[in-house]
Image (spheres, helix red, strand yellow):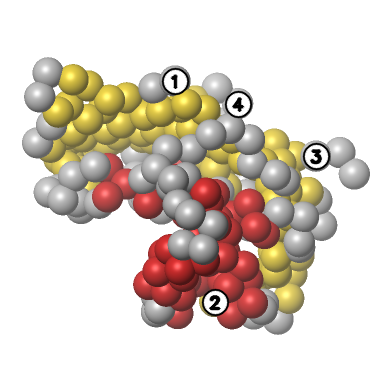
Amino acid sequence: MLLAAIVLQASAASFSPPLDRALLVVTERHDDTRLYRMERRIRFAREDGGYRAEVVLAEAEGETSDSSGALFEAGYAALAGTPLIFHLDKAGTVTAIDDLPALWERFCRRVAEVAAARRALAPAERPKFAERVAAPIRALPDGRRRAMLASLVLAVVPDEPLVPGTGPVRLPGSSAYGSARPLEGMRSVTASPGGLLRSTTVASGENVTLERITEVDPHTGLITRNSKTLRIRTGGLEKISRTQLTVEPLAD
Protein backbone atom coordinates (compact mmCIF):
# COMPACT_ATOMS: atom_id res chain seq x y z
CA MET A 1 0.00 0.00 0.00
CA LEU A 2 2.81 2.41 0.85
CA LEU A 3 4.56 1.76 -2.46
CA ALA A 4 1.35 2.18 -4.43
CA ALA A 5 0.67 5.49 -2.66
CA ILE A 6 4.15 6.75 -3.47
CA VAL A 7 3.81 5.75 -7.12
CA LEU A 8 0.45 7.50 -7.38
CA GLN A 9 2.02 10.58 -5.81
CA ALA A 10 4.88 10.45 -8.31
CA SER A 11 2.44 10.13 -11.21
CA ALA A 12 0.40 13.08 -9.95
CA ALA A 13 3.42 15.30 -9.42
CA SER A 14 5.13 14.10 -12.60
CA PHE A 15 8.02 16.37 -13.56
CA SER A 16 8.05 19.10 -10.91
CA PRO A 17 11.66 20.24 -10.31
CA PRO A 18 12.55 22.64 -7.50
CA LEU A 19 12.47 26.20 -8.80
CA ASP A 20 15.19 28.85 -8.45
CA ARG A 21 17.35 26.52 -6.39
CA ALA A 22 20.67 25.16 -7.58
CA LEU A 23 21.24 21.42 -7.72
CA LEU A 24 24.72 19.90 -7.69
CA VAL A 25 24.99 16.98 -10.09
CA VAL A 26 28.12 14.82 -9.90
CA THR A 27 28.94 12.05 -12.36
CA GLU A 28 31.80 9.64 -11.68
CA ARG A 29 32.86 6.80 -13.93
CA HIS A 30 35.44 4.17 -13.07
CA ASP A 31 36.82 2.19 -15.99
CA ASP A 32 39.22 -0.31 -14.44
CA THR A 33 41.89 2.04 -13.02
CA ARG A 34 40.66 5.19 -14.79
CA LEU A 35 38.44 7.75 -13.07
CA TYR A 36 36.38 10.41 -14.83
CA ARG A 37 34.45 12.99 -12.78
CA MET A 38 32.22 15.81 -13.95
CA GLU A 39 30.31 18.33 -11.84
CA ARG A 40 27.56 20.66 -12.95
CA ARG A 41 25.00 22.97 -11.37
CA ILE A 42 21.42 22.96 -12.61
CA ARG A 43 18.84 25.60 -11.77
CA PHE A 44 15.24 25.32 -12.99
CA ALA A 45 12.78 28.18 -13.45
CA ARG A 46 9.29 28.37 -14.90
CA GLU A 47 8.63 29.85 -18.31
CA ASP A 48 5.66 29.83 -20.67
CA GLY A 49 4.63 26.29 -21.40
CA GLY A 50 7.24 24.60 -19.26
CA TYR A 51 10.63 25.21 -17.69
CA ARG A 52 13.96 26.87 -18.26
CA ALA A 53 17.11 25.11 -17.01
CA GLU A 54 20.48 26.81 -16.60
CA VAL A 55 23.43 24.41 -16.48
CA VAL A 56 26.98 25.40 -15.56
CA LEU A 57 29.69 22.77 -15.94
CA ALA A 58 32.84 22.69 -13.86
CA GLU A 59 36.07 21.40 -15.34
CA ALA A 60 36.06 17.63 -15.62
CA GLU A 61 38.70 15.67 -13.74
CA GLY A 62 40.50 12.49 -14.66
CA GLU A 63 41.88 10.81 -17.75
CA THR A 64 39.51 9.29 -20.28
CA SER A 65 40.24 6.40 -22.62
CA ASP A 66 40.60 6.62 -26.39
CA SER A 67 37.06 5.42 -27.14
CA SER A 68 34.72 7.70 -29.05
CA GLY A 69 32.40 7.93 -26.05
CA ALA A 70 35.24 9.09 -23.82
CA LEU A 71 36.32 11.66 -26.41
CA PHE A 72 32.79 13.03 -26.43
CA GLU A 73 33.01 13.36 -22.65
CA ALA A 74 36.20 15.37 -23.15
CA GLY A 75 34.25 17.61 -25.55
CA TYR A 76 31.95 18.73 -22.74
CA ALA A 77 34.96 20.35 -21.09
CA ALA A 78 34.89 22.99 -23.82
CA LEU A 79 31.59 24.21 -22.35
CA ALA A 80 32.82 24.51 -18.77
CA GLY A 81 32.03 27.80 -17.05
CA THR A 82 29.51 28.95 -19.66
CA PRO A 83 25.83 29.05 -18.61
CA LEU A 84 23.95 26.68 -20.94
CA ILE A 85 20.25 27.42 -21.34
CA PHE A 86 17.78 24.60 -22.01
CA HIS A 87 14.03 24.89 -22.56
CA LEU A 88 11.82 22.01 -21.42
CA ASP A 89 8.13 21.26 -21.73
CA LYS A 90 5.91 20.35 -18.78
CA ALA A 91 6.88 16.68 -19.04
CA GLY A 92 10.61 17.43 -18.79
CA THR A 93 11.51 16.98 -22.47
CA VAL A 94 14.13 19.36 -23.86
CA THR A 95 12.56 21.30 -26.72
CA ALA A 96 15.30 23.83 -27.48
CA ILE A 97 18.86 24.84 -26.51
CA ASP A 98 20.06 28.44 -26.80
CA ASP A 99 23.03 29.03 -29.14
CA LEU A 100 23.19 25.34 -30.11
CA PRO A 101 25.29 25.87 -33.30
CA ALA A 102 27.99 27.83 -31.44
CA LEU A 103 28.06 25.39 -28.53
CA TRP A 104 28.34 22.43 -30.88
CA GLU A 105 31.24 23.99 -32.74
CA ARG A 106 33.14 24.42 -29.46
CA PHE A 107 32.34 20.82 -28.58
CA CYS A 108 33.63 19.57 -31.96
CA ARG A 109 36.85 21.55 -31.74
CA ARG A 110 37.65 20.16 -28.28
CA VAL A 111 37.01 16.57 -29.33
CA ALA A 112 39.29 17.05 -32.34
CA GLU A 113 42.03 18.71 -30.29
CA VAL A 114 42.02 15.92 -27.70
CA ALA A 115 42.07 13.22 -30.38
CA ALA A 116 44.99 14.88 -32.19
CA ALA A 117 46.95 15.38 -28.96
CA ARG A 118 46.85 11.63 -28.32
CA ARG A 119 48.48 10.82 -31.66
CA ALA A 120 52.20 10.91 -32.41
CA LEU A 121 51.88 13.39 -35.27
CA ALA A 122 54.14 15.96 -36.83
CA PRO A 123 53.03 19.53 -36.00
CA ALA A 124 51.96 20.11 -39.60
CA GLU A 125 49.74 17.01 -39.53
CA ARG A 126 47.81 17.83 -36.37
CA PRO A 127 45.38 20.39 -37.88
CA LYS A 128 44.58 18.02 -40.77
CA PHE A 129 43.95 15.10 -38.43
CA ALA A 130 41.86 17.27 -36.12
CA GLU A 131 39.70 18.41 -39.05
CA ARG A 132 39.13 14.79 -40.14
CA VAL A 133 37.93 13.99 -36.62
CA ALA A 134 35.72 17.07 -36.33
CA ALA A 135 34.05 16.84 -39.76
CA PRO A 136 31.72 13.86 -39.10
CA ILE A 137 30.79 15.23 -35.65
CA ARG A 138 29.89 18.59 -37.16
CA ALA A 139 27.75 16.73 -39.70
CA LEU A 140 25.58 15.02 -37.08
CA PRO A 141 21.89 15.89 -37.51
CA ASP A 142 20.35 18.53 -35.27
CA GLY A 143 18.39 15.95 -33.31
CA ARG A 144 21.53 14.04 -32.39
CA ARG A 145 23.36 17.22 -31.37
CA ARG A 146 20.45 18.36 -29.24
CA ALA A 147 20.15 14.94 -27.59
CA MET A 148 23.85 14.82 -26.65
CA LEU A 149 23.83 18.26 -25.03
CA ALA A 150 20.37 17.71 -23.52
CA SER A 151 21.80 14.74 -21.62
CA LEU A 152 23.42 17.28 -19.27
CA VAL A 153 19.89 18.00 -18.00
CA LEU A 154 18.03 14.79 -18.77
CA ALA A 155 20.49 12.73 -16.74
CA VAL A 156 18.44 13.76 -13.68
CA VAL A 157 15.08 12.84 -15.27
CA PRO A 158 13.98 9.17 -15.10
CA ASP A 159 13.74 7.43 -18.46
CA GLU A 160 12.00 4.32 -17.13
CA PRO A 161 8.48 3.68 -15.81
CA LEU A 162 7.93 3.77 -12.04
CA VAL A 163 5.57 0.81 -11.87
CA PRO A 164 5.47 -1.08 -8.55
CA GLY A 165 6.52 -4.69 -8.49
CA THR A 166 8.85 -6.84 -10.60
CA GLY A 167 8.68 -7.68 -14.28
CA PRO A 168 10.76 -8.53 -17.35
CA VAL A 169 12.67 -5.85 -19.22
CA ARG A 170 14.27 -5.73 -22.66
CA LEU A 171 16.83 -3.00 -23.31
CA PRO A 172 17.75 -2.19 -26.93
CA GLY A 173 21.32 -2.77 -28.03
CA SER A 174 23.49 0.28 -27.52
CA SER A 175 27.13 1.24 -27.73
CA ALA A 176 26.72 2.50 -24.17
CA TYR A 177 26.07 -1.10 -23.15
CA GLY A 178 28.85 -2.52 -25.30
CA SER A 179 26.41 -4.71 -27.22
CA ALA A 180 24.59 -4.39 -30.52
CA ARG A 181 22.06 -6.96 -29.33
CA PRO A 182 19.26 -6.34 -26.82
CA LEU A 183 19.79 -7.05 -23.14
CA GLU A 184 17.08 -8.99 -21.32
CA GLY A 185 16.45 -9.30 -17.60
CA MET A 186 14.24 -8.09 -14.74
CA ARG A 187 13.30 -4.72 -13.24
CA SER A 188 11.82 -4.15 -9.80
CA VAL A 189 10.48 -0.97 -8.19
CA THR A 190 10.31 -0.72 -4.41
CA ALA A 191 9.96 1.96 -1.75
CA SER A 192 13.23 2.94 -0.12
CA PRO A 193 13.80 4.75 3.20
CA GLY A 194 12.92 8.43 3.12
CA GLY A 195 10.01 8.05 0.74
CA LEU A 196 12.08 7.55 -2.40
CA LEU A 197 11.39 5.09 -5.18
CA ARG A 198 14.15 2.63 -6.04
CA SER A 199 14.25 0.94 -9.43
CA THR A 200 16.66 -1.99 -9.84
CA THR A 201 17.39 -3.43 -13.28
CA VAL A 202 19.58 -6.45 -13.99
CA ALA A 203 19.86 -7.44 -17.65
CA SER A 204 22.34 -9.34 -19.77
CA GLY A 205 23.13 -10.28 -23.35
CA GLU A 206 25.95 -11.93 -25.15
CA ASN A 207 29.08 -11.25 -23.03
CA VAL A 208 27.43 -8.22 -21.36
CA THR A 209 25.77 -7.79 -17.95
CA LEU A 210 24.19 -4.55 -16.73
CA GLU A 211 23.04 -3.65 -13.24
CA ARG A 212 21.35 -0.27 -12.76
CA ILE A 213 19.90 1.18 -9.56
CA THR A 214 17.94 4.43 -9.72
CA GLU A 215 16.44 6.35 -6.80
CA VAL A 216 13.79 8.96 -7.57
CA ASP A 217 12.13 11.62 -5.42
CA PRO A 218 8.39 11.35 -6.18
CA HIS A 219 7.84 14.97 -5.03
CA THR A 220 10.07 16.42 -7.78
CA GLY A 221 10.18 13.61 -10.32
CA LEU A 222 13.99 13.89 -10.31
CA ILE A 223 16.67 11.27 -9.83
CA THR A 224 18.61 11.62 -6.58
CA ARG A 225 21.05 8.78 -7.25
CA ASN A 226 21.76 6.55 -10.22
CA SER A 227 24.41 3.83 -10.39
CA LYS A 228 25.29 1.59 -13.31
CA THR A 229 27.70 -1.35 -13.37
CA LEU A 230 28.56 -2.75 -16.79
CA ARG A 231 30.55 -5.96 -17.21
CA ILE A 232 31.87 -6.86 -20.66
CA ARG A 233 33.60 -10.21 -21.18
CA THR A 234 36.01 -10.68 -24.06
CA GLY A 235 37.74 -14.02 -24.25
CA GLY A 236 39.00 -14.75 -20.78
CA LEU A 237 39.01 -11.09 -19.73
CA GLU A 238 36.30 -9.02 -18.05
CA LYS A 239 36.11 -5.23 -18.24
CA ILE A 240 34.10 -3.50 -15.52
CA SER A 241 32.78 0.05 -15.84
CA ARG A 242 30.99 1.71 -12.92
CA THR A 243 29.13 5.00 -13.24
CA GLN A 244 27.41 6.88 -10.44
CA LEU A 245 25.35 10.05 -10.57
CA THR A 246 24.25 11.96 -7.48
CA VAL A 247 21.98 14.99 -7.19
CA GLU A 248 22.00 17.23 -4.13
CA PRO A 249 20.50 20.67 -3.43
CA LEU A 250 22.98 23.50 -2.91
CA ALA A 251 22.59 26.15 -0.27
CA ASP A 252 21.83 29.57 -1.76
Quickly name the residue at label 4.
194
Q: Please give the name of the residue rendered at 12% of the width and 37% of the height, measured from the top-left corner.
A: 205
Which of the two labelled residues, at mark 2 and mark 4, occupies the earlier sequence position?
2
Badge 2: residue crowd in 10 Å (few <14, some 14–19, many ≥20): few
For the residue pair 239 and 2, the one nearer the viewer reads as 239
Which of the two labelled residues, at mark 2 and mark 3, occupies the earlier sequence position?
2
* Mark 2–mark 3 distance (CA, rounded to whole Å): 26 Å
SS assignment at label 3: loop
| Residue 128 in the image: above or below residue 246 | below
Which of the two labelled residues, at mark 3 and mark 4, occupies the earlier sequence position?
4
Q: Is residue 56 left or right of residue 185?
A: right
* Mark 2–mark 4 distance (CA, rounded to whole Å): 33 Å
Residue 17 occupies which quadrant of the picture? Answer: bottom right
Quickly name the residue at label 2.
95
For the residue pair 99 and 21, the one nearer the viewer reads as 99
Q: How many marks?
A: 4
* Mark 1–mark 3 distance (CA, rounded to whole Å): 30 Å
